[in-house]
Image (cartoon, rainbow, N blue to C red):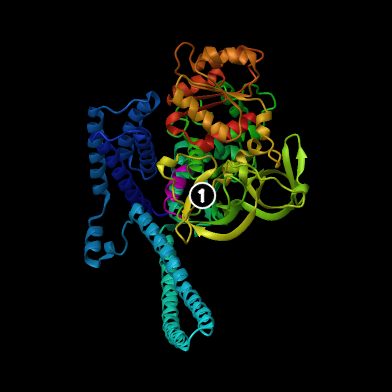
Amino acid sequence: MSDKDLQSYFRAEAREISDGLSRALLALARGEPSDGAVRELFRLAHTLKGAARIASRPMIGDLAETMEDVLAVHREAETELSAQEIDEFLRLVDVIDGELRALEPAKEHAKAATTGEALESVRIDLQELDRLTEAVFEARVQAASLRSSAGGIGALVDDAQRTIRDLAGDAERRSGAALRSVERARAAVDELRKALAVTESQLTARADALWRELERVRSQTDRLRMVPAESIFDALERAAHEAAHATGHAIALTTAGGRVRVDRHVLPTVRDALIHAVRNAVDHGIEPPDVRVAAGKPRNGRITIRVARTGNRVTFSCIDDGRGLDVDAVRRAAVDRGLVPDPDGFGVEDAARVVFAPGFTTAPQVTPLSGRGVGLDVVRAAAERFDGEARLSSEPGRGTEVSLLVPVTLASVPALTVRHAGPGLEHAHVLVPLDIVAGTVGVRHDAIVRSPNGDLVRYGDEMLTFVPLSRVLGAVPSPRAPEDRWSVVILRAHGQSVALGADGLGAILEVVVRALPAAAGRPPFVLGASLDIEGVPRLILDARAIVSAARSLVGATSGAAPAATRRAPILVVDDSLTTRMLEQSILGSAGYEVDLACSAEEALEKAAARRYGLFIVDVEMPGMNGFDFTATTRRDARLREVPVILVTSLASDAERRRGAQCGAAAYIVKGEFDQRVFLRRVEELLG
């Protein structure tokens, strides 16, 4: 890349970041809600600092680092910026803007003004585009209804003709005058039929043309949302070169799959996550040049960014040929943080899981690239934001691969229609996203295998956990005769497979995922809803959550209690009645048995009388707090094996570290609470 190109890219990115800083700071100055504002400002300042360093713009980099240092203190302490700090930050942004204007060649202004090139491309407001997409979808619903209505005209005429025939038969048994009246009516109906036939044909043709045009518009609006993945490659290359310069390493970055198109809503988050993955690869993976040469490797470390689409999902991979994951360093850091109570047997797979933990780092001190615990946590957060997956694989001495699996688009998804016909939800039709449907198969009821761990279904050479759709929907399972057949949908996600039993399968539809109304809450295992061609809402299942929570949903299909109730129960400990009820509702809907305690002292009494499989504990409670409760149970020979999840509003890194040091297996911040992630973590700890 030439220096001219580098500076051009930097100016564009820095201008976008500067605008983002200004908007966020002005919102704070206006007194608007500030949840997450400090974290967002920190991310922007951090990104600008890195971009300025690689573009050799030290003044802009220093200004960004000044903001980053102040914001880091507020982020750790969970405090807000003061009015004076906001004013000072706005002043620094003005200075940065001045520096950026000075970098822009004057001739670029003249060229744009004289040639009109500035009008050839415009920024699209994604919210406006979303509204356009919804409007097109609504119009398609109306067009489908019009087509259906047009097809019903002929049926109405046929009904009229049958009525006339009945009247004619009755009139023949009466007077001739009545028969003549019927004949006149018959002639009138015939004329009406001919006229309506023409109207029906024209109306149907126009409805079909409208439908085709709306399909074309929908396709175009969907395409407007999609941009080539290669649009983020330059930012990744800049990040790699910046990191190499900071560490003294030599690297060569290559890319593949750049023509894969991805939703505009998805790509910025993916870009930020991959920037951290690239920096992590350079700082922790790629060896110094002399070490590589001594090991028989090329002097320049190789980093490959690979993009590949499979169905409705796309995988972004950052692959390096460095030293591989330092399992010993990860184990030591994990033990220090209390993430691994027993380090014996800690291997590569354990390390690959732990490195995604929030705030995790193996760096002994803070540097421009490492030590703040951002790294792979950003990759994990990006995966969770889009209901995707973050993976890491590594081979000692040969390198590491970090992969991020996300949806191609958030606008629409192909989905399979499945039907439940049992009591409680008669003839309910729900939708399952097609991207994780591995197959379908018909299974007789008496072919389901009963086991101590629940029901199983054979699929190829596998025995898969069988989950009736009725349990997912919270309905009563229908009685089954041995010869009754299930329509089984094989769901595959997170490296696991589950057999979902339904009463029937329907069409594969392209659907727009809509959020549920706030009044509906967040039902377990529901991703959203979509309107069918009649305007009737249908639930879209969160199939990945079903796979994750499958063990809590299994049970005999004859109506026996779920297998989860046969496992050790969960004890929820919180002094807030609202929180206790919410967590009990979520866990109970997922099939778990739940006991409640309103204080740590009461929880210890209950734990002395009954064996639990998991403690879910608030931190800030009167008397003994959650940290002390956790530490107390870790010292108890009978309770130390029971995992503890701390659920709290305390979100600082210091509080997270304290929770880990006390021995908590997980730390969930209430302000960042996500039901699916919560249930997934519960299932992992109970599994």
Q: Is residue 613 above or below residue 136?
A: above
* Element class at badge 1: strand
Q: At which x and y percent is residue 613? A: 64, 24
Q: Which residue is mark 1?
A: 539
* Depth check, front residue: 186 or 8: 186
- Taking the image as shown, residue 458 lies to the left or right of residue 150, namely right
Q: At which x and y percent is residue 124? A: 33, 56
Q: At which x and y percent is residue 352? A: 61, 35
Quadrant into which the N terminus falls: bottom left
Label 1 crowd (10 A; few <14 / some 14-19 / many >=20): many
Whether residue 533 is visible: yes
- Taking the image as shown, residue 636 lies to the left or right of residue 60, namely right
Residue 393: image quadrant is top right
Whether residue 400 is visible: no
Which portion, as a residue range, is magenta? 261-273
Tell me which residue sits at (29%, 45%) in the image: 19
Q: Amino acid at mark 1?
A: Leu
Quadrant into which the C terminus falls: top right
Residue 88: image quadrant is top left
Q: How many labels sit on residues?
A: 1
Q: Is residue 403 magenta?
A: no
Q: At which x and y percent is residue 492? A: 64, 48
* Depth check, front residue: 616 or 493: 616
